[in-house]
Amino acid sequence: MARIKIPRKSTAIDMTAMCDVAFLLLTFFILTAKLKQEDPLRVDVPASSTKLNVPDLDMATITVGKGKVFFSLEGTDLRKGLLEEMGKKYNQSFTPEEIAKFSLIPTFGVPISGMKQYIAMTQEQRKAFVQPGLPIDTTANCELFHWIREARIVDKNLHNKELRFSIKGDSREDYPNVQKVIDVLQKQAVNKFSLITSLNSK
Amino acid sequence: MAELDTSGGGGKKGGKVRSKKASTRIDLTAMVDLAFLLITFFIMATTLAKPKAMETIWPDKTDKTKQLPVPQSRTMTVLLGSNHQIEWFLGEPGKSVPTKDNFGKNGIRKSLIDNSKKVEETHAVPDNYMIVLIKASDKAKYKDFVTMIDEINITGIKSYAVVPLLPVELELLKRDGLY
């Protein structure tokens, strides 16, 4: 009796198409990627129906949360110039190494007197360190005022553009704290700025 | 090439040495593995929901000459109290009864649209738009403020301003239990 033989199929599959798809997706993700930045202060931004994206260049963000104020400036060249100018203003001399190190810190919230120690820290130490936030009050002489002012001057000198400002506030933050920051901005006639929100899913 | 030829059959009959044709099929499994690993990494490392910027323009405080008087018949004042509670009134404080309201489609948004229509009907062109004054108390949260400006953007109110709270208005909020 003849037995019917079922031909055994090879288990090897053609991977070409799968490989194509995988690399296509990979290319897409690499091109659109903007790496997540570690924020020293986690804020939960309120939602709104605004659909305008936050611009990437010539942008300074003031983060407000838990009663603290943080400042961040896009662009390493701008940050270098900013620290130089602030050092001159507060009679602190920063070495070129310190300035180069500072240019890699996107967001900070330490007063200028503690800046040297903060820059000297390693990455891990910085993560563990609780930043006190920038000193702020309603007079025109608070530190935040000067950070904003010098950042505007540096941006004008290096890029010849008006620096744009945005406020990133925590949704549970008391309104007067945000108003203080707005007052500081308005004191130097920055009357146009954006509030950072997330897209409302409704 | 000869030393690579492992078939061993070529030379016996004295014919030509032929290299064996290798299959062009390569095993892609490892490559696919790697590609998906990288995809996973990039998905994890990127921010998907990009933050949005809400543009706001504030009145110039340094220029005192540009300050316009606000006709009280066209103003609507919104007071932001504690615990996401709000109330609004038309005209001057104390002269009209404030209405308690809430955020949402049928709350403040409806009030804004209704009042705006009313003002438009009772006033002559071109000064027939409503002016909204937002006054946040010390207990208001930043979220309420953003929601309020968002509602104004949604309803297309042409003119609004953020103004400090007056003592009279604080009394109103306290009286209505919103502070």
Image (cartoon, rainbow, N blue to C red):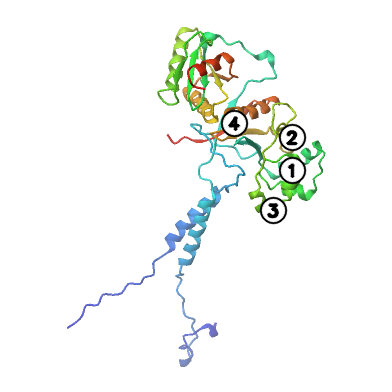
Q: Is residue A27 above or below residue B24?
A: above
Crowd around label 2: few <14 · some 14–19 · many ≥20 (10 Å) = some
State which chain disc 1 sits on: A
Same chain for labels 4 and 2? Say yes or no: yes
Separation (CA) of disc 3 from disc 2 = 26 Å
Q: Which residue is mark 1?
A: A114
Q: Are marks 3 and 2 on the same chain?
A: yes
Residue B130 location (% of width, % of height)? 51, 14
Q: Nearer the viewer, residue B88 or A185?
A: B88
Residue type highlighted by circle 4? Ser
Instruction: Tell me the SS state at disc 4.
Output: strand
Mark 3–mark 1 Cα distance, whole angstroms, equals 15 Å
Rendered position, B161 above or below A130: above
Question: For residue A122, which numbered disc appears in the image?
Answer: 3
**SS at mark 3?**
loop
Residue type, mark 3 in image = Thr
Mark 1 residue element: helix
- Identify the mark nearer the N-term, 3 or 2: 3
Q: Residues under labels 3 and 4: Cα distance? A: 33 Å
Mark closer to the chain start, 3 or 4: 3
Q: Badge 3 sits on which subunit?
A: A
Q: Are marks 4 and 1 in contact (CB under 8 Å)?
A: no
Q: Are marks 1 and 2 in contact (CB under 8 Å)?
A: no
* Numbered mark located on residue A194 in the image: 4
Q: Residue at x 58, y 28 (%)?
A: A175
Quarter of image, res A94:
top right
Please state which of residues A13 and A172 is positioned toward the viewer in this rendering: A172
Separation of marks 1 and 2 at Cα, in angstroms = 18 Å
The chain letter under disc 2 is A
Q: Which residue is mark 2?
A: A150
* Vertical order, B158 against A176 (above or below): above
Please determine if labels 1 and 2 lie on a single subunit.
Answer: yes
